[in-house]
Image (cartoon, helix red, strand yellow):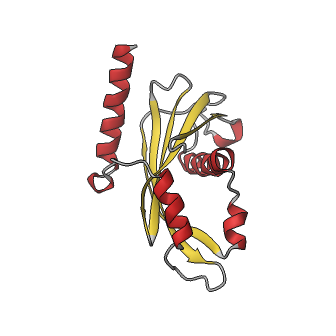
Amino acid sequence: MEKLLRSEYVIRFSDCDLFGHLNNARYINYFLDAREDHLRKYYDIDLQTFYKQGLTWFVAGHEILYLRPAMYNEKVVITSATIHHSPDSFWVEFVMMDEQETHLKSVMWTRFVPVNVKTGRKENHPESFMEFARQITVEGIPVEAGLKERVATLIAMRKTLVMQG
């Protein structure tokens, strides 16, 4: 099963500031929309399916680093991957790169918390979800080291690929 999910997007005019840069707040929308697209494309999952089963998630927090501006009408690649899961949360890593995938634009980690649709209260993931999460989680990403350390690793990996290519 695919773990690193990928798609391409074009930066829209209405999402940009006067300088043609993607507005900082809009990165979050691009990332979350990409994740929804990825779940549908790679796993044939529609978030409404979980909702109908009584499960949804709230965003417990975003941590985002902006590295290079994404520009109006630029084609970018967005990847998403589950990088950590536990009974009471899971973490998704989002990466936006240029079309050639040589330069990072932004990296974001989001922590999602499961919530019961009927009660509106936080509750642990059902075992069926935990089994799915075990299959799609990318192993070896040290969440405890933090996002800055992860970005340094991603930059070093890109430099190595460029030197080899």
Does residue 11 appear left or right of residue 67 in this picture? right
Does residue 66 appear left or right of residue 34 in this picture? left
Work out whether residue 59 can be spotted: no
Q: Name the quadrant of the N terminus.
A: top right
Work out whether residue 165 can be spotted: yes
Does residue 162 appear left or right of residue 12 in this picture? left
Q: At 44% from the left edge and 71% from the top edge, which residue is drawn? A: 87
Query: Horizontal and vertical percent for residue 144?
Result: 28, 57
Of the pair 96 and 38, the residue shown nearer to us: 38
Q: Residue furthest bottom?
A: 119
Image: 75 above or below 56: above
Of the pair 78 and 82, the residue shown nearer to us: 82
Query: Horizontal and vertical percent for residue 92?
Result: 48, 53
Query: Horizontal and vertical percent for residue 130?
Result: 49, 65
Q: In terms of image quadrants, where is residue 45?
A: bottom right
Of the pair 110 and 137, the residue shown nearer to us: 137
Q: Name the quadrant of the C terminus.
A: top left
Q: At 50% from the left edge and 33% from the top edge, which residue is drawn? A: 69
Q: At 33% from the left edge and 43% from the top edge, which residue is drawn? A: 150
Q: In terms of image quadrants, where is residue 53?
A: bottom right
Q: At 67% from the left edge and 47% from the top edge, which residue is drawn? A: 37
Query: Horizontal and vertical percent for residue 129?
Result: 55, 66
- Number of marks in picture: 0
